[in-house]
Amino acid sequence: MKQKMFSTVRRYEEVKDTKAAAIKIEEVFVPLISALPGFIEYYCIDLGNGAMMSITIFKTLAEAIAANTKSRSWVEEHLSSVLSRSVRIEAGPIVVYNGK
């Protein structure tokens, strides 16, 4: 049986410059989120039309939920010039996973 993992998903809308946002996310946010306990993976997706989504994988649900709280304040503090506040935040268990 594979190890159980938990994901947190955040959606951002009205992003004025997704390329600039991606650069700043990679430079500033990724080092912060990846240092959290239980961190496994992080993805940032450009959905087009000024929308972006991030997916972060953690070992436990508590760690995923704690990351949501920290992420909100980090975005406000470090990324408000390129990202608005997330419009939707979800967290839950990953029930199907296949990767290489």
Image (tube, rainbow, N blue to C red):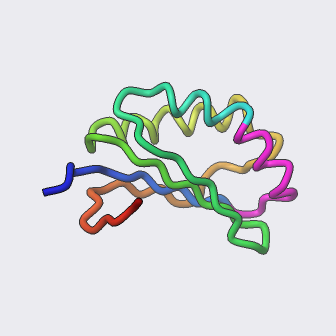
- Quadrant placement of the N terminus: bottom left
Does 14 appear in magenta?
yes
**Left or right of 94 in this view: 88:** right
Nearer to the camera, 1 or 9: 1
Q: Quadrant for residue 30, please give it.
A: top right
- Of all residues, the one furthest to the bottom in this rendering is 49
Q: Residue at x 57, y 54 (%)?
A: 54
Residue 15, x across and y down, in percent? 78, 58
Nearer to the camera, 91 or 44: 44
**Left or right of 25 in this view: 6:** left
Q: Residue at x 52, y 47 (%)?
A: 42
Does 46 appear in magenta?
no
**Range of residues picked out in magenta:** 13-26
The secondary structure that most of the magenta stretch takes on is helix
**Left or right of 23 in this view: 93:** left
Q: Quadrant for residue 60, please give it.
A: top left
Residue 8, x across and y down, in percent? 42, 52
Residue 28, x across and y down, in percent? 71, 31
Nearer to the camera, 32 or 84: 32
- Of all residues, the one furthest to the front in this rendering is 100
